[in-house]
Image (cartoon, rainbow, N blue to C red):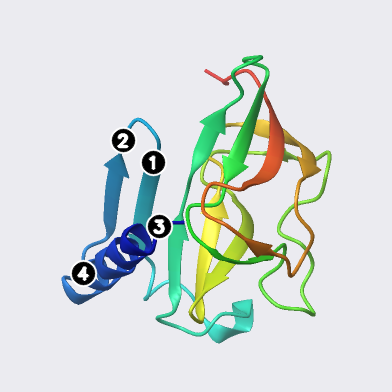
Amino acid sequence: MNEKVLEQIKDLIEWVKSNALEELSIKTQDLELKIKNAEEKFTSSQGVLPGTQQTLTCSSQDKESDKYFYINSPLVGTFYRSPSPASPAFVETGEEVEPRQTLCIVEAMKVMNEIVSEKRGKIIEFLVENGEMVEYGKALVKMELLEEVD
């Protein structure tokens, strides 16, 4: 990831926190970034210290098929499947997930960034190992798109 872009994302996270915004969304042709200020909602019993958690989403549609899509890392960091080493994974392969459901965490500079699904789907495969360093845009999870429920 470009250092300038990473610095801009960090600045945006700080700006959201300092202005007490609930959520900031930015969408471009190449990236969709959502920063959700979740300071008040999380406790250390969930494995994350209060005030250190932001929610980020970044997904990409598979160009070969509308059946599958990928959840990509919106930043450089360390990939984790659970909120703490002693906790179970957020989701397992084969599970169905709903929009805004947490799939994993990418830790960057001691900030735990929840990665959530934007669509209803089924987890096909985790594409990185727990504790692995990931780059911006790296595919983390392959999902099968499920029909929307009316």
Name the one closer to the observer, 140 or 41: 140
Describe the element under mark 2 as helix, strand or loop: loop
Amino acid type shown at disc 2: Thr
Q: Residue at x 61, y 24 (%)?
A: 62
Amino acid type shown at disc 1: Glu
In the rendered image, the vertical position of residue 6 relative to residue 95, given as above or below:
below
Q: Residue furthest top?
A: 65
Q: Which residue is mark 2?
A: 28
Labels 2 and 1 touching (C-beta < 8 A)? yes
Amino acid type shown at disc 3: Asn
Closer to the eye: label 2 or 3: 3
In whole angstroms, how far apart are the C-alphas of marks 2 and 4? 19 Å
Measured as percent of width and height from the top left, residue 8 is found at 28, 62
Labels 4 and 1 touching (C-beta < 8 A)? no
Q: Which residue is mark 4?
A: 15
Describe the element under mark 1 as helix, strand or loop: strand
**Number of other residues with Cα within 10 Å of mark 1, as a class: few under 14, some 14 to 19, many 20 or more:** some
In the rendered image, the vertical position of residue 61 relative to residue 13, given as above or below:
above
Q: Which residue is mark 1?
A: 32
In whole angstroms, how far apart are the C-alphas of marks 4 and 1? 18 Å
In whole angstroms, how far apart are the C-alphas of marks 2 and 3? 16 Å
Q: Which residue is mark 3?
A: 2
**Mark 3 or mark 4, earlier in chain:** 3
**Mark 3 or mark 1, earlier in chain:** 3
In the rendered image, the vertical position of residue 101 relative to residue 130, given as above or below:
above
